[in-house]
Amino acid sequence: MSEKCAGCGKTVYFAEKITAIKKTWHKPCLRCEKCKKTLQPGKLSEHDDKPYCNIPCYSALFGPKGYGHGGTESHSYEAAPRK
């Protein structure tokens, strides 16, 4: 029985198989859901069964707001309520 790639849906043969977030992938198919950067198993974050690079994408999307790696996408400022 052959396994299917979680990224492209095609057959993954043993020589090209990598496993991450409990799924089987071709190496080039394991990409960040947001920026599409190729990822390494064990060096990624997962949210809703989808892979993300740790920095900047995962921290910007799902980390605490107002903190991060210094990029503008990780900061959110809300206007103070008017009196």
Image: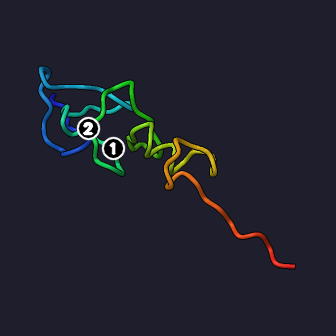
* Amino acid type shown at disc 2: Thr
* Amino acid type shown at disc 1: Cys
Residue drawn 39% across the image and 44% down it: 50
Do labels 2 and 1 touch, CB within 8 Å?
no
Residue drawn 43% across the image and 46% down it: 57
Specify whether 22 is left or right of 66: left
Specify whether 41 is left or right of 46: left
The residue beneath circle 2 is 38
Q: Which mark is residue 32?
A: 1
Q: Which mark is residue 61?
A: none
Q: Position of residue 78 (x, y in %)?
A: 68, 66
Between residue 69 and residue 30, name the one nearer to us: 69
Placement of 35 over or under 14, stated as above or below: below
Q: Residues within 10 Å of mark 1 (few under 14, many from 20)?
A: many
Judged from the image, the secondary structure of the residue bearing numbered disc 2 is loop
Going by the picture, which residue comes out furthest to the right? 83
Residue drawn 20% across the image and 31% down it: 27
- Gap in Å between the C-alphas at discs 2 and 1? 7 Å
Q: Quadrant of the N terminus?
A: top left
Q: Position of residue 7 (x, y in %)?
A: 24, 44
Between residue 68 and residue 27, name the one nearer to us: 68
Q: Position of residue 12 (x, y in %)?
A: 15, 31
Between residue 31 and residue 70, name the one nearer to us: 70
Q: Quadrant of the C terminus?
A: bottom right
Specify whether 8 is left or right of 40: left
The image quadrant of residue 31 is: top left
Placement of 21 over or under 67, stated as above or below: above
Q: Residues within 10 Å of mark 2 (few under 14, many from 20)?
A: some
